[in-house]
Image (cartoon, rainbow, N blue to C red):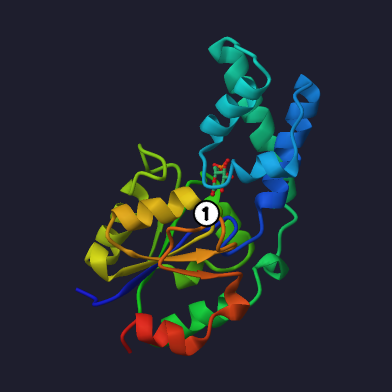
Amino acid sequence: MFKKGFIFDLDGVIVDTAKYHYLAWKHLADELGIPFTKEQNEQFKGVSRKRCLEILLEWGDLTVPQTQFDAWLAEKNEDYLRYIETMTASEILPDVPKVLKYLQEHNIPMALGSASKNARPILKKVGLIPYFSTIVDGTQVQKAKPDPEVFMIAARELKVAPNNCVVFEDALAGIEAANTAGMTSIGIGQKEILTEAHFVFRDFTEIELNFIKELAEL
Ligand code: BG6
Ligand code: MG
């Protein structure tokens, strides 16, 4: 058993893919004649692809047969994947590698815990696969955040007790999931939104390695 384990959400924590999700949803929304703003896109953070489309259709007051629903879901994802295709390591958010390298140097196991079914290809594109002992993504979970399932699987695979895990999250649903799992939650974003997080930082440039050292009990 390792004493401490660190779990990272992907979108909005490691890479800024929210802008690509926004563009792909906006494209579909325009096609369907449903207004969709950047503020509305905030509500899609941490939410599964399927649930996002359900919400969009609710906003547009549209009910459609399953085949149409599935076709739009696929269309949005194909659009999103076209943006992902162009991603490089330059899109890793500032100072994320600093923290990953520090933890790796001190043999602290790390997991990815993401709602995205595209998590693996994205991590591969930006070259971060080698840092993670395990990757838990949207293909493995039955229950979406705020259910703690994704983080509980990550803790089990890291062989670290949940209350010894530290989670980095940008979505309120993710913070709730981490808290329910009994983990230490670190919010990345606005204090006003991530009110339930144990600690909040605007981004990784605000996180000092001494803070990580204390969390990891090094
Ligand atoms: C989350 C994002 O990480 O993954 C959400 O914050 C997204 O915005 C969800 O909807 C699912 O992603 P994907 O890649 O499976 O469509
Ligand atoms: Mg996120």
Q: Nearer the viewer, residue 194 or 150?
A: 194
The residue that appears at 64% across and 27% down in the rendered structure is: 56
The residue that appears at 51% across and 58% down in the rendered structure is: 194
Can residue 159 be seen in this snapshot? no
Q: Secondary structure at mark 1?
A: helix
- Disc 1 residue crowd, few under 14, some 14–19, many 20+, Cα 10 Å: some
Callout 1: CB less than 8 Å from ligand 1 = no
Is residue 7 positioned above or below 68 on the image? below
Q: Give residue 156's quadrant in the image.
A: bottom left
Looking at the picture, which amino acid does disc 1 mark? Answer: Arg
Can residue 99 be seen in this snapshot? yes
178 lies left or right of 122: left
Which residue reaches farthest left?
Answer: 1
User: Residue 19: horizontal and vertical position, in percent?
Assistant: 72, 51
User: Residue 157: horizontal and vertical position, in percent?
Assistant: 28, 60
Image quadrant, ligand 1: top right
The residue labelled by disc 1 is: 120
User: Residue 136: horizontal and vertical position, in percent?
Assistant: 40, 53
The residue that appears at 67% across and 33% down in the rendered structure is: 76
Is residue 159 positioned above or below 65 on the image? below
The residue that appears at 53% across and 30% down in the rendered structure is: 50
- How many numbered badges does the structure rendering display? 1
The quadrant of the picture occupied by the C terminus is bottom left
The quadrant of the picture occupied by the N terminus is bottom left
User: Residue 198: horizontal and vertical position, in percent?
Assistant: 40, 67
Is residue 197 positioned above or below 46 on the image? below
Q: Nearer the viewer, residue 108 or 19?
A: 19
